[in-house]
Amino acid sequence: ALGGWLASVIPIADQPTLSAWSNIGNIGAGGVMAYVSVRLIRLLPLPVACVLLGCMILVPMAIFPFIPAPTSERRLARESFGGLLGAIMALFRRSDVLVVLLLFGLPSASFTLTNILSGLGRDFHTPESTVSLLNGAGVTFAGVLACLLGGWLCARLPLRQLYLGIGIVGSLFTLSLLLLGHNPVTFGIATL
């Protein structure tokens, strides 16, 4: 929702930059939370850790009052949702949209490997502190680098081939984990 809101109040020419930096911010925040949350839960009583984590999630919302509202016409929520539902249904009847959704879904499915692996550190004989570090700082760095390379790649490769390539490489790599030993090095490579 925030991405849509911001996109409605900035010039169209700045939207690719907004998209890249929104993803970098999202990945960075996820990395910080992955690293900090384990430490807070281990070092503090659980209720205190939960309150602190909740506050950390709410703090970025302090910027919302300073973002201007979009200058679109005002309508009732019922009118907005009705029009939105109609537009979505019309999109799902287009075959090119279904292909794009599939292309977005396939690489995204392979990206969930990082989330799954974060809970499998023991299976790879990897200490919790290493899992936390890899899922915090490591994934943040790798994600930021990927976001910065994304614009460069999108400008040089046809998007359909790029998305398919990402999905194919991701799935082949995931399959390769069956052949690799379950050790901290494999865990680190797979996570990053």
Image (cartoon, rainbow, N blue to C red):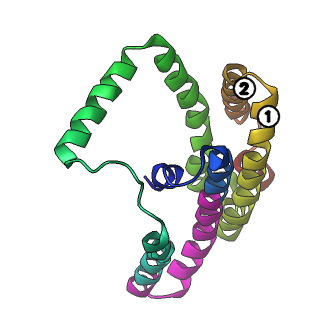
Residue tagged by mark 2?
162
Look at label 2 and name its amino acid. Answer: Leu
86 on left or right of 152: left
| Residue appearing at x 48%, y 20% in the figure | 97
Element under disc 1: helix
89 on left or right of 106: left
Can residue 147 be seen here? The reply is: yes
Q: Which of 86 and 191 is in front in this view?
A: 86
Membership of 99 in magenta stretch: no
Q: How many marks?
A: 2
Residue tagged by mark 1?
153
Q: Nearer the viewer, residue 102 or 155?
A: 155
Q: Earlier in the sequence, mark 2 or mark 1?
A: 1
| Residue appearing at x 61%, y 41% in the figure | 111
Q: Magenta-highlighted stretch: main secondary structure?
A: helix
Alpha carbon separation for disc pair 2 and 1: 8 Å
Can residue 182 be seen here? The reply is: no
| Residue appearing at x 78%, y 51% in the figure | 145
Question: Which image quadrant for residue 161?
Answer: top right
Look at label 1 and name its amino acid. Answer: Leu
- Where in the figure is residue 170, as x and y percent of width and height? 69, 32
Question: Which image quadrant for residue 90?
Answer: top left
Local packing at callout 2 (Cα closer than 10 Å; few below 14, some 14-19, many 20+) is some
The residue range painted magenta reads: 25-49
Q: Do the residues labelled 2 and 1 touch (CB within 8 Å)?
A: yes
Query: With respect to residue 95, does 75 lie above or below?
Result: below
Query: With respect to residue 67, does 50 lie above or below?
Result: below
- Where in the figure is residue 83, as x and y percent of width and height? 26, 33
- Where in the figure is residue 167, as x and y percent of width and height? 66, 28
Element under disc 2: helix
